[in-house]
Amino acid sequence: MYVQAKDTRMTRSLVLAAAQLGPIQKAEGRDVAVGRMIRLLEKAHQRGAQVVVFPELALTTFFPRWYEEDLANADHWYEAALPSNETAPLFEAARKYGIAFHLGYAEKTPEGRRFNTAVFVLPSGEIVLKYRKVHLPGHKEFDPIRHVQHLEKRYFEPGDLGFPVIRAPVAGQPVNLGMMICNDRRWPEAWRVMGLQQVELVMLGYNTPSLNMENRGFEAPHLRVFHSHLSIQSGCYQNSCFAIATAKAGTEDGHELFGHSIIVNPQGEIMAQATSWDDELIVAEADLGKCELGRKTIFDFARHRRPEHYGRIADQVGSVPPAEWKGGA
């Protein structure tokens, strides 16, 4: 008779939550967004969540769709410090409920630099990790061919912090934490850099429109969601980690954001998915020990990676045509 060996590993379990936000209109202040986030934290507490991830640019509308000639006119969209007077109630609620959280926001540094930023905050209010978006999509100047502008390259610099991973205590146990923002999820290099640091939980927020607004070819709306999920699921599988991917959703300032927030396991499976275009909390329990299987088998980097053949990835930016076959011997 076959008897399966008992798994004697100590389980490291975390209850993860994605706190999807419905639309935040241009006319709405931070107090509206923060109030909604606090209500989602209350729900997270009721459902036993220990980590909550809010979307990219969670405090405001997605303002890069609006063109400003003078960047100073956009200063009111940025945070100069955290917590601010407007965001302090969110930090206080996290302390009250004992929940760690990820927050995406627009950052303006004391030197006047602007970044699309996310932080991971412990219930104590300590910021243990900061990330600045590296892969900025869109364009810098007004583009008349576009249906809607996407001016992230105008309002933000590319992130200067790389893709750091930190081992920090979450709910009384150490967790290897990493972050990315929106478009970063589509770039396998971002996942692999964190995978090489044994990341266990990747947190990311996004604001992705239901339609490709670049007006340079058709992309079916259902493929927009498919490509987003495909990127996250493959990133988790190929780097043996969990991910919480949290969206803004619904019709914001007349423009649809597709939502579909998900929580994914190291096998690339979707554990939970949002089904509304509004504020919605989804929850899943993660056994962090599940990260070990991939790392010890097919994605055992120490045994199987061959970086001597990957130089082109780091050395080259644009694509180039391949060598031409000339025929003959």
Image (spheres, rainbow, N blue to C red):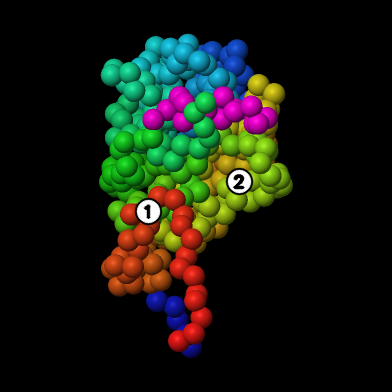
Q: Which mark is residue 76?
A: none
Q: Is residue 176 above or below residue 182?
A: below
Q: Quadrant of the C terminus?
A: bottom left
Query: Which circle, 2 or 1, is nearer the viewer?
Result: 1
Pinpoint residue 189: horizontal percent, then vertical percent.
40, 53
Q: In which image quadrant can residue 159 be found? A: top left
Q: Is residue 104 above or below residue 315?
A: above
Comes first in the chain, label 2 or label 1: 2
Amino acid on which the number 2 mark rests in the picture: Gln
Task: Specify whether 238 is left or right of 175.
Answer: right
> Could you tell me what secondary structure mostly forms the magenta stretch?
loop
Check whether the beta carbons of the residues at disc 2 and disc 1 lie within 8 A of each other: no
Work out how far the residue at label 2 is from the one at label 1, CA to CA, in angstroms: 36 Å
Q: Is residue 41 above or below residue 12?
A: above
Give the residue number, with chain letter if any, for mark 2.
Answer: 273
Q: Position of residue 149 (x, y in %)?
A: 60, 27
Q: Position of residue 252 (x, y in %)?
A: 65, 25
Residue 5 falls inside the magenta stretch = no
Local crowd size for mark 1, using a 10 Å CA cut-off: few (<14), some (14–19), many (≥20): few
Give the magenta-colored segment's residue range. Answer: 142-157
Element carrying mark 2:
strand
Residue at 30%, 72% in the rendered image: 303
What residue type is disc 1 on? Gln
* Residue 222 seen in the figure: yes
The answer to whether residue 169 is above or below residue 30 is below
Q: Which label is found at residue 316?
A: 1
